[in-house]
Amino acid sequence: MSLWPDSIVTIYSDTMAYILILGLITMTNQFKVGKDHHANMLYFRLCIITMINALSNGISYALHHQVTNWPEPVRLIFPTIAEYSALLAMFVWFLYIDYKLYGIWDRTAAVFNIYKIPVYVMGILCIINLFTGVAFSVTENHIFVAKPLYYVLLFTVYLYGIFPIVLIIRYMKENGPLHFFHISTMIIPTVTAGMITAFSDYSARALGFAIALVFLHMSYINLWRFEDNDSGFYNKHYISYVLEQSKSGKADYHSAIEFVTANTPEEFYDILRIEVPGKAEIIRMGENRFLLFSESSKSSMITLLSSMIQDAADEYDELHKDDEPIDLVISYSVRGKGESAEDFVKAAAQA
Amino acid sequence: MLNISDLHLASLLMDAAAMFLIIGTMASTYIYRKRGRMVDKLFFIMLVIDMVMAISDGITYVVDGATISGVGILSIVCNNIFFLAFEGICGVLAVYLDCRINADKPYSQKKAIKILLPAIISFVMILANNLVHFLYWVDLSTNEYYQYPLYTLVFVAPVIYMIYVIYALYRIDRSIVWIFIVLIVVRVFFANIMQGVSSTALIFAMGLVFVHIHYMRLPFYDKEVL
C-alpha cells in the first residue's frame, strides 16, 4: 500500500493531534483541576471526540486512492465518523465554554436541550447517508465526493464552532475582559486549520482543534489558581504574585482602596466592574472584602472613584430595601514617602 | 520558481502548527515569565529557540530546489540556524530540567555550562561544516539540500541530552516520562517512513507544552507570603 501525498500530510497532522490529546488526557487525569466535576467531564469528552476525529480522519485519508472491494456503506464508515465527530466536538466545545463562563450547570443543560436538535438531525442524516450516499459518498478508490447536502452538515459544523466565540464576546461585553483566557489562541489555530481543510486537499482540523484544547487547559489552570469563581476578580492567592511584582519593581502601586460589605450580592460585582478603570486590579481578599490597587496616588482620583462606588452601592440599597443591604464601607491608603512598594502592598493586604 | 512538493507542504504545516503552539504558550505563560525565576527564563528561551527552529526549517523547505538565484545562500544560512537551534534547545532543556530537579539549590552558571558542553561542541561542528562540508550542504547550482554520511554526528549531542531528559523527567514525575518517549519514538518512526517531512519543531513544542502543563500544577510560589 503506497500513500499519496495528501494522505501523508493528513496522517502526519492527525497523528500529531492524537499524541497531543493523549498527552492532555494523561495530564488532566493525573491532575483534576479544582473540584469542577462538570467542567472536567466536558473537557475529557471533548478530548475523546477529537481523538476519534483524528483517528477516523487519518484512516480515511490513508485509504485515499487505494482500490478495495468493500461495499459503499463500509467505505463510508470512517469518513462518516470523521464528519460527525467534528460536529460533536464543536457542540461539546460550545457546552464547555457556556459552563465555564456562567458556571451554572442547569443553564448549560438548557443550552444542550435547545441546540441538540440540529446535532441529532445531522446524526440521522449521517446514518441515512451510510446506505444511500445522499450527502456524501466515497468512490471505489476511497475518494470523498461531496454532494449539496454535505454542505449543510459542513455549515452546521462551522456554525457550532462560531457559537462559543459569540458567547465569549457577549460575555466580555457584559462582564469585562476575561483573565487568563486568550480567545485568539483558540480561534486562530482552529480557523486556520479549518481553512486549510476547506481550501486544500489536506485535513488539519483535528490538529488545529487539539492545539486549541491545549490552551483551553492552560487557561483553566490559571483561572482555577488565581480567579475567584463567584465574582471573576482575582482571588487572594493572586496577592502573592502582586507582592513579588512589587518586590522586583515590576509593579509600582501607590494607593489601595478597600471595600468592605455587610452583604455581597452579584450586583456589587457589577458596580465594581463598571466603575473601576480597566487597568486597576481588584482582588477579593475574603467573602466581603475587596482590595483595589492602583499605580496612581492622586487623592482626587481616589476620592472620585470611592464616591462613585459608594453612591452606586447606596443606590442599590435604596432600591432593594427588601434585600440584605450592601452597607458598603470604603477606606483607602496611600503609599508613604520612603515606604517600599512591597511593604505597602503587604500592609494593605493585611489590614 | 519555487519547487514545493507535498512532503514540503507537510513540513510547512508541521512548522506552522509548532508556531501556533509556541505563540499560544507564550501568551498563556506570561504570568510565569513575569514571575522571573530562572526556570521561567529558561522555558522562555526554549520557546524562542523553538520558534527560530520552526521559521528556519520552514524557509529551508520553501527554497529547497527553487530556481531563484541566491536562495542557495539563504538555504545554507537557514539550515545552519536550524541545526544550531536544534542542538541549543536540547542543551537548554537539560539545564531547565536540572534546575527543576535541584529547585532547592541556587542556579549555578558553571554547572549550566558543563551541561551545555555537548551542545557547544556541536555548535563548533556545525560552524566547521561551512568550511569543510562533512555533515550537510546545499548544492548552489540546484539549490538542493543533501546530507553527507557523517550527518548522523548531528544527533550525538541530542541523543545524550534525550537520555538525560528521560532520566530527569523520571525523577520529577514518572507519569510524564512516557509522553516524551512516545514523542521521540514517533519522530524517529516518521523520519524513517516519511523521509522529507520535518516535524522536529512541532515535537519540541509539544514536549515543552507538556512540561509546562505539568509545572503549572505546582504552587505558584513556594509558600503563601501572607
Image: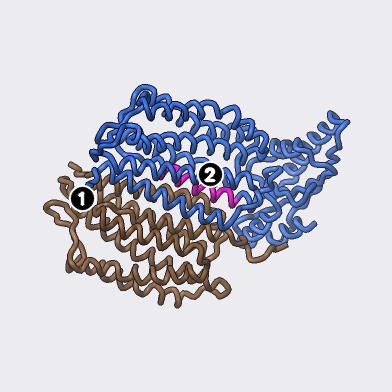
Q: Is residue B27 above or below residue A85?
A: below
Residue A65 seen: no
Task: Find disc 1 in the rendering and name its residue.
Answer: B64
Q: Quadrant of residue A236?
A: bottom right
Task: Give the labeled residue for mark 2.
Answer: A45
Q: Which residues are magenta?
A: A207-222
Q: Main secondary structure of the magenta part?
A: helix
Residue under mark 1: which chain is it in?
A: B
In the image, residue B168 above or below residue B32: below
Q: Colour of chain B?
A: brown
Question: x and y percent of residue B160 in the render?
Answer: 36, 72
Q: Position of residue B205 (x, y in %)?
A: 41, 55
- Label drawn at residue A338: none
Image quadrant where residue A175 sits:
top right
Q: Chain of mark 2?
A: A
Q: Image point 60% across, 36% down: which residue?
A: A98
Q: How many marks?
A: 2
Name the colour assigned to chain A in the rendering: blue
Relative horizontal placement of residue B217, taking residue A235 as reference (left or right)? left
Residue B133 in picture, x, y percent from top left:
17, 66
Name the residue located 55 percent from the left edge and 74 percent from the top edge: B106
For the C terminus of chain A, the quadrant is bottom right
User: Residue flagged by tag 1: what amino acid is it?
Assistant: Asp
Q: Nearer the viewer, residue A97 or B118?
A: A97
The crowd level at tag 1 (other Cα within 10 Å; few <14, some 14-19, many 20+) is many
Question: Cα distance, mark 1 to mark 2?
Answer: 42 Å
Q: Is residue A206 left or right of residue B82?
A: right
Q: Name the element at disc 2.
A: helix
- Can you tell which of label 1 and label 2 is closer to the viewer? 2
Residue A217 within the magenta-colored segment of the rendering: yes
